[in-house]
């Protein structure tokens, strides 16, 4: 009887052990799957964060590079136009005959643009003699082409600044309309009009689309 009871107890113990081992294996597998899924989720999250951080870094570097390129190009353009300003300053003093021809052309341009009977011209005081000669020639050419005389006088009440590079300002309609034909204004307009062509010449055909859109 004792042996039978011992045997039954051992078998019962083995059943309990087997069931416990089975439940342990199931629970272990469940925990492993949960932890694996958690690790995968964490890895995916960190991967996305790393990818986004890398994209932000690339974008930031690209923007910084773009800004440096734009700044360098603008500096070069500024230096180019500054040299042009320095050169036009010496035009009036460098070649009197050339400057006289330029003055005549600037005055004549104003006469054609305004197309009035009486015109006033502003100039630097030191240019008055040259401007008077330019006025005579321009008025004569205007009459030859248009068939009408025009009275052109120097407006001495408000001369151009002496530190101006040169040129003239032409006034019509009793001073209500002004055509600024000073060297500084012509260069400013040239900077605006010629800037795309200058950029293309210096930096290539695609620079405007690539960097300035």
Image (tube, grey):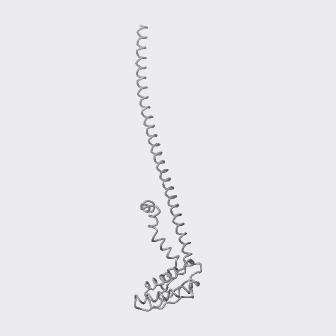
Is residue 7 shown to the viewer in this render? yes
Give residue 96's position: percent from left, percent from top.
Answer: 55, 81
Instruction: Pick the quarter of the image with the C terminus.
Output: bottom left
Q: How many marks?
A: 0
Q: Residue at x 43, y 34 (%)?
A: 36
Looking at the image, which residue is at 53% across and 85% down? 131
Frontmost residue, 8 versus 186: 186
Say which quadrant the N terminus sits in. Answer: top left
Residue 33 on image: x %, y %: 42, 33
Counting from the top left corner in percent of width and height, residue 124 is at 57, 83
- Taking depth in this image into account, of 83 and 117 the one nearest to the observer is 83
Task: Work out whether 22 lies above or below 71.
Answer: above
Q: In the image, residue 112 lies at what x, y percent?
A: 43, 85
Q: Give the vertical position of 6 relative to 100 (above or below).
A: above
Pick the residue in front: 56 or 33.
56
Q: Residue at x 46, y 84 (%)?
A: 108
Q: Which residue lies at the image location 49% right of the left edge and 57% below the top edge?
A: 66
User: Is any part of residue 180 visible from this angle?
Assistant: no
């Amino acid at each position: 009887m004792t042996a039978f009871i011992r045997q039954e107890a051992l078998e019962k113990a083995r059943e309990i052990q087997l069931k416990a081992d089975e439940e342990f294996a199931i629970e272990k597998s469940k925990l492993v799957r949960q932890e694996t899924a958690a690790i995968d989720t964490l890895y995916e999250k960190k991967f996305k964060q790393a990818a986004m951080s890398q994209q932000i870094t690339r974008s930031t570097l690209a923007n910084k590079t773009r800004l440096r390129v734009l700044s360098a190009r603008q500096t070069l353009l500024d230096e180019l136009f500054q040299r042009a300003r320095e050169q036009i300053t010496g035009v009036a003093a460098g070649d009197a005959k050339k400057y006289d021809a330029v003055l005549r052309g600037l005055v004549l341009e104003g006469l054609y643009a305004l197309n009035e009977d009486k015109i006033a011209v502003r100039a630097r005081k030191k240019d008055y003699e040259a401007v008077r000669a330019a006025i005579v020639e321009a008025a004569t050419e205007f009459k030859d082409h248009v068939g009408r005389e025009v009275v052109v006088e120097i407006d001495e009440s408000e001369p151009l600044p002496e530190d101006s590079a040169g040129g003239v300002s032409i006034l019509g309609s009793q001073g209500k309309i002004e055509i600024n034909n000073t060297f500084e204004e012509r260069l400013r307009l040239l900077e605006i009009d010629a800037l795309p062509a200058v950029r293309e010449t210096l930096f290539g055909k695609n620079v405007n689309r690539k960097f300035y859109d």
